[in-house]
Image (spheres, helix red, strand yellow):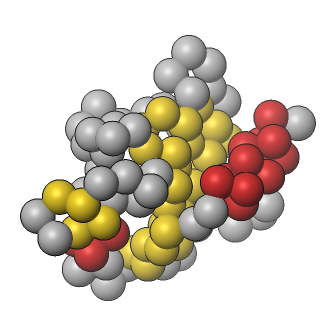
Amino acid sequence: MYANIQGALLEKYIKVQWLHDFESEPVMIYVELDENRNELRKVEVYRDGHHDFSDGSRSTGNTKLSEEPIPLILDINQDVQFEATPIQQEEFEAIWKNALV
């Protein structure tokens, strides 16, 4: 985890559940962030179980890294269609490894 800024702990790894009914959009998004909350790596998991990923130099499907810093988890969770939580590096690495297969 990163330093505390304005009273909020900045997590390095997060997962975001996206609550929706769109077949062509991911339902779970896993992200690795740098200290400025920019995405380093991302995995998107779809309802049918397939994964797409991006690390900035390579990607699959329509997945790409955000050009803007990712909001704090508290801010993401203000939108009822998202449920963001911090995760451990090991969980992210397992999802990343699975996405590369």
Image location of residue 66, percent across then percent down: 36, 37
* Residue 61 appears in the rendering: no
Q: Which quadrant holds the C terminus? A: top right
Q: Residue furthest left?
A: 6
Tell me the quarter of the picture where residue 65 sits: top left
Image side of residue 74 versus residue 61, left or right: left
Q: Which quadrant holds the N terminus? A: bottom left
Q: Residue furthest right?
A: 101
Image side of residue 89 versus residue 100, left or right: left
Image location of residue 88, percent across then percent down: 62, 62
Image location of residue 60, percent across then percent down: 66, 30
Q: Residue at x 51, y 50 (%)?
A: 31
User: How many circles with numbers are drawn on the protein?
Assistant: 0
User: In the image, is residue 24 above or below residue 73?
Assistant: above
Image side of residue 30 versus residue 40, left or right: right
Q: Residue at x 73, y 56 (%)?
A: 90
Q: Decide which of 36, 96 is in the foreground and name it.
A: 36
Image location of residue 99, percent across then percent down: 77, 42
Q: Residue furthest top?
A: 57
* Residue 81 appears in the rendering: yes
User: In the image, is residue 80 above or below residue 31?
Assistant: below
Q: Residue at x 81, y 42 (%)?
A: 97
User: In the image, is residue 48 above or below residue 99?
Assistant: below
Tell me the quarter of the picture where residue 41 sits: top right
Q: Residue at x 48, y 33 (%)?
A: 40
User: In the image, is residue 56 above or below residue 97?
Assistant: above
